[in-house]
Image: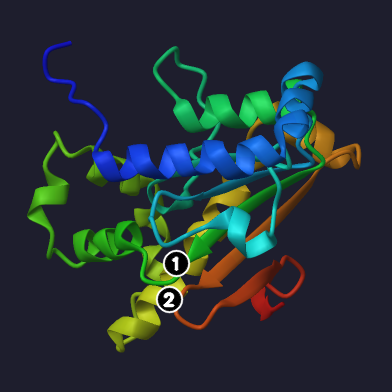
Amino acid sequence: MQHAKPLPSYLVKRFLGWKATNYTQNQSWYRHLVAEGQHPRAMVISCCDSRVHVTSIFGADQGEFFIHRNIANLVPTYNPDGDFHGTSAAVEYAVTALKVAHLIVMGHSQCGGVQGCIDMCEGKAPQLEAKDSFVGRWMDMLKPRYETVAKIKDPETKARAFERQAVVVSLENLMTFPFVRERVEAGDLSLHGLWHNIGEGGLEGYDAKSGKFENI
């Protein structure tokens, strides 16, 4: 692989620092994780956004969360068509093999993917409309929900509302997976929707009964 380059020196230094401190001080714990395998209590589906740090928000240790990240924390509908489905594969593994007890979808403020979907719906993103845009085609699954925020005039308010809708869409789509629905209806798995305000450090939880997000 001629195009692969050595790791940047600052990352090498950080790794060596971690190996000399955190790993050395907790070597038995790391070996325990290997010997016992992973047994996470929850799966978290969050955005690829570098500002979203799920383990820090919840103070999670290694082995506690099974984490999947993608653009705009979206989950597609169940579609076993033989194509490549990274998110669906992650959900399947977490639910059927790891037997997680909780499945959490966490959206966030200032989501670029959600804003891109808004721009597409408003005819402002021809580059995302192109057939060869992976981001655009991924965000297509959220476009039908745009009508719920279309009448909001303030761009910031509209974006924040649509970010929350992305979480709701993913929760709805999760229930189209037979193995998810089966465990939810049996009471063995619970679904949770969250929205994280990066700048304010806030967290909101989705209340299915009211259809609203409430501060946690």
Q: Position of residue 117 (x, y in %)?
A: 28, 59
Question: Which residue is at a point 76% across and 21% down the rendered structure image?
Answer: 37
Residue at the farthest bottom position: 154
The image position of residue 132, as x and y in percent, is: 14, 34
Q: Residues within 10 Å of mark 2 (few under 14, many from 20)?
A: many
Residue type at numbered disc 1? Glu
In the image, 209 versus 110, the foreground residue is: 110
Q: Residue at 71% across / 31% down in the picture?
A: 27
| Residue receiving disc 1 | 163
Q: Secondary structure at mark 2?
A: helix
Q: In the image, 52: left or right of 45?
A: left
- For image coordinates 14% across by 36% down, the residue present is 131
Which amino acid type is marked by label 2? Arg
Where is residue 157, by image quadrant? bottom left
Q: Is residue 15 visible?
A: yes
* Above-or-below relation of 31 to 210: above
Task: In the rendered view, tell whether residue 145 sits above or below residue 17.
Answer: below
User: Mark 1 near mark 2, Cβ–Cβ under 8 Å?
Assistant: yes
> Measuring 24% from the left and 46% from the top, which residue is drawn there?
136
Split into 4 quadrants, where in the image is the N terminus?
top left
- The numbered disc on residue 37 is none
- Badge 1, how many Cα within 10 Å: few under 14, some, many 20+? many
Q: CA distance from mark 1 to mark 2?
A: 5 Å
Task: Give 28 or 132, whichever is nearer the viewer.
Answer: 28
Residue under label 2: 160
Residue 24 in picture, x, y percent from top left: 65, 36
* Residue 216: quarter of image: bottom right
**Foreground pick, 56 / 176:** 56
